[in-house]
Image (tube, rainbow, N blue to C red):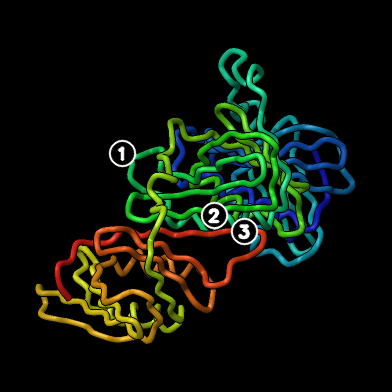
Amino acid sequence: MKFNVGSKALYSYVSAVSKVINTKNAMTVLNNFLLELKGETLTITASDIENRLVGQLAVSNAEGDGKYCVDARRLVELLKEMPDQGITFTINDQTLESEIAYSNGTFQFVALRGEEYPEPAKAEGDEEAQVEPIVLKMPAERIVTAIENTIFAASTDDFRPQMMGILWDVKPDNLVFVTTDTRKLVRYIDKTVAAGKEGSFILPTKPAHILRAILHDDEEVEVTVGPKSASFKSPSMSLTSQLIKGRFPDYNRVIPPYNPYTLTVDRAAFISAVRRVGVFVDPSHGLIRFKITPDCIHMKTVDSNYNTKGQESVPCQFDGNELIIGFSAPYLIDIMNTLDSPELKISLSDQGRPGIIRPSEEQADSDILMLLMPMNVQEF
């Protein structure tokens, strides 16, 4: 098997595909790429059993077809350091001796037979065939935006596996993305996707991170969802991922239907003040106390272990009376870092009910809501 290809073109593909490979794998062969040459198309595959990422690129002067496994880490690191020029990739079909050659040098290693690489997992029985899949076509940019706005709120608690991913709640006229870790919740609605049917699935955070990294804004992605897996196909990449089993919590029940008071505040000023005061929080809980008046937010934190405290005020507009409430500084900063609106609108009710945080200017094609549970405070 032999072909020519640009070093940086090949590097862009192998570096993207390598994102699916775990640092440690139960099967040693999974430390490799599967390279398959058919005609003048090279297919590069990586897998961790649960996720399988495939990229295809055109090569030139191809000789022979075949599939072989090559060490992923070594190939990525070599191509990263090579200048941008053509290389010749050769694998001896008999001895498996492999060589990458370019104008200034050659690099040799040994490949493995492609038959040693695990095949994609097949569904048990005919279950996948019996259920009509959900098929969506949407711009890659919409997927990336939804992931960026939600993934930070996904749970990392192994005891709540259903929350360790992003819920894709497919509606006839929109697509809802939801994450929660019980302390915070994000609901992002994409109004541009109209599937014409209903369904839902939970995508784990690892493939979500991979999608965010590999998708290009100018591509269209076809999403095909079965009972146990989902595939995401773009012109250059294809990712297949096993889904999280179980039922996602009913997020609509968590969101308060009515928070009567609205707090409007400059996002940049608010997040800067929270960061400064947050330096002095007790790290065991991260609590900041807020006293909200019609024209000012007063914030205070105390760490009795080190006898430190911080206090600051920020102008605001609040249409309620004085309200005292507590929030976790790290969670609040996560939310404000994700929202990019100049001003934030925070809907509140009382010190025991969650706050609803939204950008001051809603987009016509989307709707985002972030919920943050309060912490118990009795006085400022």
The residue beneath circle 2 is 188
Look at label 2 and name its amino acid. Answer: Tyr
Q: Quadrant of residue 289?
A: bottom left
Residue named by callout 1: 159
Q: Earlier in the sequence, mark 2 or mark 1?
A: 1
Question: Circle 1 — which element?
Answer: loop
Q: Nearer the viewer, mark 3 or mark 1?
A: 3
Residue depicted at 40% across the width and 74% down the height? 263
Q: Residue placed at 25% from the left, 68% from the top?
A: 326
Which of discs 2 and 1 lies nearer the camera? The answer is: 2
Q: For mark 1, does the 10 Å Cα neighbourhood hold few (<14), some (14 to 19), or many (20 or more) residues?
A: few
* Residue 97 visible in the snapshot: no
Q: In this rendering, would 243 be left or right of 86?
A: left
Residue 168 vs residue 30, the one in the foreground: 168
Task: Please state the horizontal and vertical placement of residue 224, each as a whole percent of the image.
Answer: 67, 35
CA distance for labels 3 and 1: 32 Å
User: How many residues crowd around disc 3 within 10 Å: few (fewer than 14), some, or many (20 or more)?
Assistant: some
Q: Number of numbered discs present? A: 3
Secondary structure at badge 3 equals strand
Three-letter residue code for mark 3: Ser
* Residue at left offset 38%, top offset 38%: 161
Mark 2 touches mark 3? (CB < 8 Å): yes
Residue 194 spot, x, y in % from top left = 70, 44
Name the N-terminal-most of marks 3 and 1: 1
Inter-mark Cα distance, 2 to 3: 7 Å
Residue 49: give x, y in percent of width and height: 53, 33
Q: Is residue 300 left or right of residue 266?
A: left
| Residue 253, image quadrant | top left
